[in-house]
Amino acid sequence: VLVNPLPVFHSFGLTRGTLLPILLGMKTVMFPAPLQYGAVAKITRETEASMIVATDTFAMGYARAAKPGDLEKVKLVFAGGERVKEETRAAWASRSGAILIEGYGATECSPLISGNPFEDNRPGTVGVLMPGIERRLTPVEGLPADHGRLAVRGPNVMVGYLLADDPGVPKPPEEGWHDTGDIVTLDEGYMTIRGRAKRFAKIGGEMVSLAAVESLASGLWPDATHVAVSFPDPKKGEQIVLVTTQADADRMVLLDHIQAEKAPELMAPRAVLVVGEVPVLGSGKVDTVATRAMAMELRSVM
């Protein structure tokens, strides 16, 4: 039994959560409100579901809201749409022993690009390429040599984008290569997403991953949601601001943690802003655009 709380308008919720179970003849439980964490956990128990599909944000919400026994039948959590945090894996392991299988994709790629095999699941990676897909890594200035911007080609890649200046005529990817805009590294064929190209801040000529800053904050405050955003800086090019739901978040405490982790000082946020809730898209991903606007407004009144 598979529980699918993801919206069907989202490619992950449509393919993995809806079409695949239908094609395999599996019982599927659809729930139309993924943000009702307690209700999703309850229906998981009532239907004795053994699998669930979710983004990291939603998966952590279900684990936190679950009452004893709600998730005990769940064996597999298929996670995608955003990076899965270690805190989320630990939360599920403590409540049900479920294994989180992380994959990676894009709507333009139908949507799956890679995934972790059941027999060799490597937490922290997004697994290996699906059959028939090629990859190309392009070096990015300011990043280590093993980091590259990922483009993929294969039968799963879309015909093309429909653009306003040429209605009705798909504009295909050049030579079939779709630029994902993601920065990745490889280890024995397993990919690790290091961040979106747009989610790197250039500080003093060095590229700093905003996702890595969020990971550091999660290591210190695992029960909160953290979003790192960047703003122009007249002296260093850009500066990082951390938006967090950790009520007692303190920048100096975070700086001490960053030093203890031996992370570069460039990863230290210029400011830490505490909010009651971080905006989330209907697809389950954090709304980074809305969060950045929130941070900008908060900084203007400080």
Image: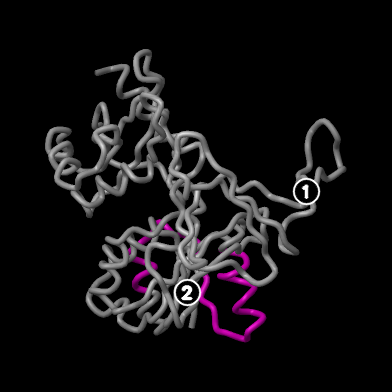
* Circle 1 residue: 160
Tell me what residue is drawn at x 31 percent, y 30 percent: 241
> In which quarter of the view is residue 46 placed?
bottom left
Element at label 1? loop
**Which tag, 2 or 1, sits closer to the chain's start?**
2
Q: Is 24 covered by the magenta stretch?
A: yes
Tell me what residue is drawn at x 40 percent, y 42 percent: 279
Q: In this rendering, is residue 24 above or below 200?
A: below
Q: In this rendering, is residue 162 above or below 85?
A: above
> x, y percentage for residue 65?
28, 64
Query: How far is the residue under mark 2 from the one under mark 1?
Result: 32 Å
Residue most extreme to the top = 234
On screen, residue 56 versus residue 86, left or right, reads right
Residue most extreme to the front = 145
Tell me what residue is drawn at x 24 percent, y 72 percent: 67
> x, y percentage for residue 173?
76, 47
Viewer-proximal residue among 39 and 222: 222
Element at label 2? strand
